[in-house]
Image (cartoon, rainbow, N blue to C red):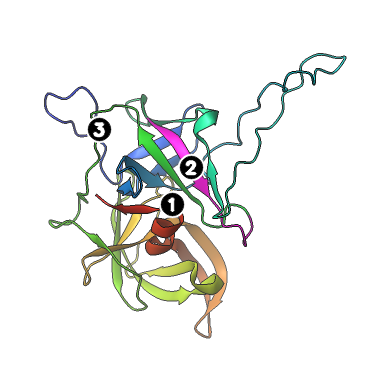
Amino acid sequence: MSTHGDRRGPRLIAGEPLSEEGSPYEMSLGGWFRQRASGAPVLLTVEHRLGPPPLLPPAPGTLPVAGLVPQPPADSRGEDGIVDRRAERRWLRHVTTHTRVAQVVATGGTGWNPSGLLDACIAAPVDPEELGTDEYPPVPWVPRVAAPRVGSTVVKYSYRGGLRQGRIISVSENDGREVLVTATDDRPFSMAGEVGALLIDLEARAAVALYVGDVHMRGVNERQWAVLWSARPLPLLMDAFQLAPL
């Protein structure tokens, strides 16, 4: 984990290993963006590595005879399908330093799809001096954001798996909400703990998707694939969470 010189907090960059506090499930920091309304920096990663929402005590006047019965929090999903998680006070930690680094702000499914289809999460840095960075370690340039393209070569970087390369074979699965990638060498495109990493289109010099996991025995382009790697189009997530590049 790199540092900010004399600054108090750690410098979180793309690919760093994160987990929710109290959870053994690891994810990668995809990248940093800013909220369009406030300009505040937030990190982007996956949702499915978070645990279930915490149970809250019952509202006043609802005590049962047997005592307190924890209640699930009210679903604060808006019309856009984004769930505000700030009241739940859920925290992300850096896996190797065990440092609390960010508070979960929101998670996303869309109102017209099953909950969690977007499989994404944004979180705000705990350290007020952590402003995020648009650097991406494997490349010497700052990626812009663009739509994924069939046939393009993409790379993915994480602390756990290093640099992996693949090729996009489909951007039209699930009505354009899923990108599918195949490996371009003998190594798998991903390993455990890498979900949440960004996919970078090398030719376009752009971040194009958020990696969410592998899928098996999928038929695509008149071929049955034993394993492919699934991602969410980044422009879709930027619109859903109202994000902009730093």
Frontmost residue, 139 versus 57: 57
Q: Quadrant of residue 129?
A: top left
Considering only order in the chain, which callout, 1 or 2, is on the residue closer to the N terminus? 2
- Residue at 41% over, 50% down: 196
Q: Is the residue 27 above or below the residue 241 in the image?
A: above
Q: Inspect the image, locate mark 3, and give the three-letter code of the amino acid beneath it.
A: Glu
Q: Residues within 10 Å of mark 3 (few under 14, many from 20)?
A: many
Q: Is residue 67 above or below residue 47?
A: above
Name the residue that disc number 2 marks: 106
69 on left or right of 243: right
Q: Amino acid at mark 2?
A: Ala
Image depth: mark 3 or mark 1 in front: 1
Estimate the spatial distance between the alpha carbons at disc 2 and disc 3, rounded to whole Å.
19 Å
Mark closer to the chain start, 2 or 3: 2
Where in the figure is residue 235, as x and y percent of width and height? 38, 63
Give percent across and percent down for residue 236: 43, 62
Residue 189 in view here: no
The boundaries of the magenta stretch are 102-114
Asked if the magenta segment contains residue 236, the reply would be: no
Of all residues shown, which one is farthest toward the bottom? Answer: 222
Tell me which corner region of the image, top left, top right, bottom left or bottom right, holds residue 160: top left
The residue wearing badge 3 is 130
Helix, strand or loop status at disc 3: loop
CB under 8 Å between discs 2 and 1: yes
